[in-house]
Amino acid sequence: MVKVVWTDNAIFDLDSIGNFISKDSVRYAEITVLELFESADVLEDYPKCGSILPEFNNPELRQLIRGNYRIVYLIKDEFRIDILTVHNCSRLISNFNLIEKDL
């Protein structure tokens, strides 16, 4: 089983998503953030289930699409995956520097 590690940046992204949604509905914000967080659990058993990130040519850099969000992760080795960012699909990834630094 692979250990899934949420980076500080990814946790910040979840907090930002929750804060934005909570302006309209606190309950929906809680549900959305929890679903995004729990959707990464599948990576423990199936680390390559996400698609390769199209912006990069690296088979270890992948994404899970969940609703309107992409969960970008890096397969560090056979024992660890780092969740790098959670991003709205309609927006370009603006934190390429963060991702490139982790490669």
Image (cartoon, helix red, strand yellow):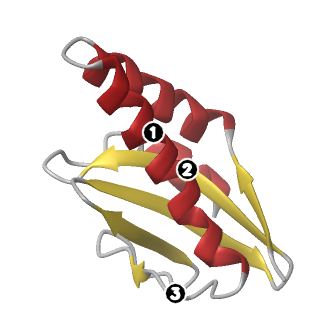
Please say if 80 is above or below 94. Answer: below
**Residue 36 location in percent, x, y?**
46, 51
Residue at (53, 53) in percent of width and height: 99
What residue would you read off at disc 2?
37
Instruction: Say whether residue 55 is left or right of residue 50.
Output: left
Secondary structure at badge 3 equals loop
Q: Residue at x 17, y 45 (%)?
A: 91
Above or below 16: residue 95: below
- Foreground residue among 39 and 13: 39
Which element type, helix, strand or loop, lies under badge 1? helix
Foreground disc of the pair 3, 2:
2
**SS under mark 2:** helix
Query: Quick one: quadrant of the C terminus?
Result: bottom right
Taking 17 as reference, is 43 above or below it? below
Left-right relation of 84 to 86? right
Disc 1 marks which amino acid?
Val
Q: Which residue is mark 3?
A: 59
Three-letter residue code for mark 2? Phe
Local packing at callout 3 (Cα closer than 10 Å; few below 14, some 14-19, many 20+) is few
Residue with the mark numbered 1: 33
**Marks 3 and 2, Cα distance to the nearest angstrom?**
22 Å
Q: Relative to residue 56, is residue 60 depicted above or below?
A: below
Q: What whole-number distance in Å separates the C-alpha atoms at marks 1 and 3?
A: 27 Å
Task: Sort mark 2 into few (<14), some (14-19) or many (20+) by Cα contacts within 10 Å.
Answer: some
Q: Position of residue 7 (x, y in %)?
A: 68, 43
